[in-house]
Image (tube, rainbow, N blue to C red):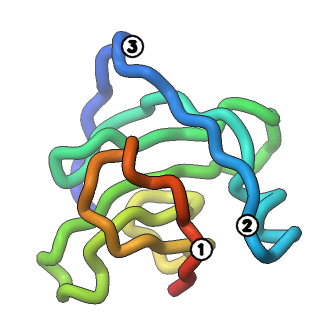
Amino acid sequence: MQQQQRVPATVSGLQVSGGWDKGMADTVAGTYSPFSTNHHRTVYRRVQPKTDSNVLLYYWDERDGEEQRGWWFGPEVGGEEVWAHNRSEEHTSELQSLTSSR
């Protein structure tokens, strides 16, 4: 696992909603704020709705294979448990459709 760095609070957050699977949509939907960085991209942590679970959105580059590249939802950066994956390498403004899963 790569060491994470804190990001300045000046970076804006994200709003995630929808999805074809209601259970998964409930898991990842909410408001996300910058939390740290990974592979030179911002890692976002869900801040609303508040739960006991950690929900992160993070970028992983191709260092572990092209199929691993993209944006991931999971409880920890680079962990085995993940909920959704989008192979886009674009910045978060392009993350409007995170519907494919690992």
Position in image of residue 95 (x %, y %):
45, 54
Residue nearest the viewer, comparing 31 with 17 = 17
> Which residue corresponds to mark 2?
19
| 93 vs 55: above or below | above
Q: Secondary structure at mark 2?
A: loop
Q: Earlier in the sequence, mark 1 or mark 3?
A: 3
The quarter in which the N terminus is drawn is bottom left
Amino acid under disc 3:
Ala
> Label 1: how many residues lie within 10 Å, few (<14), some (14-19) or many (20+)?
some
Position in image of residue 39 (x %, y %):
18, 54
Which label belongs to residue 9? Answer: 3
Position in image of residue 96 (x %, y %):
52, 54
* Residue for point 29% across, 88% down: 67
Position in image of residue 98 (x %, y %):
54, 66
Q: Secondary structure at mark 3?
A: loop
| 100 vs 19: above or below | below
Give the mark toward the camera: 1 or 3: 1
Q: Earlier in the sequence, mark 2 or mark 3?
A: 3
Q: CA distance from mark 1 to mark 3?
A: 28 Å
Q: Residue furthest left?
A: 63
Q: Is residue 22 left or right of residue 90?
A: right
> Label 3: how many residues lie within 10 Å, few (<14), some (14-19) or many (20+)?
few
- Residue 99 occupies which quadrant of the picture? bottom right
- Residue 78 occupies which quadrant of the picture? bottom left
* Residue for point 35% across, 74% down: 87
> Which residue corresponds to mark 1?
99
Amino acid under disc 2:
Gly
Q: CA distance from mark 2 to mark 1?
A: 6 Å
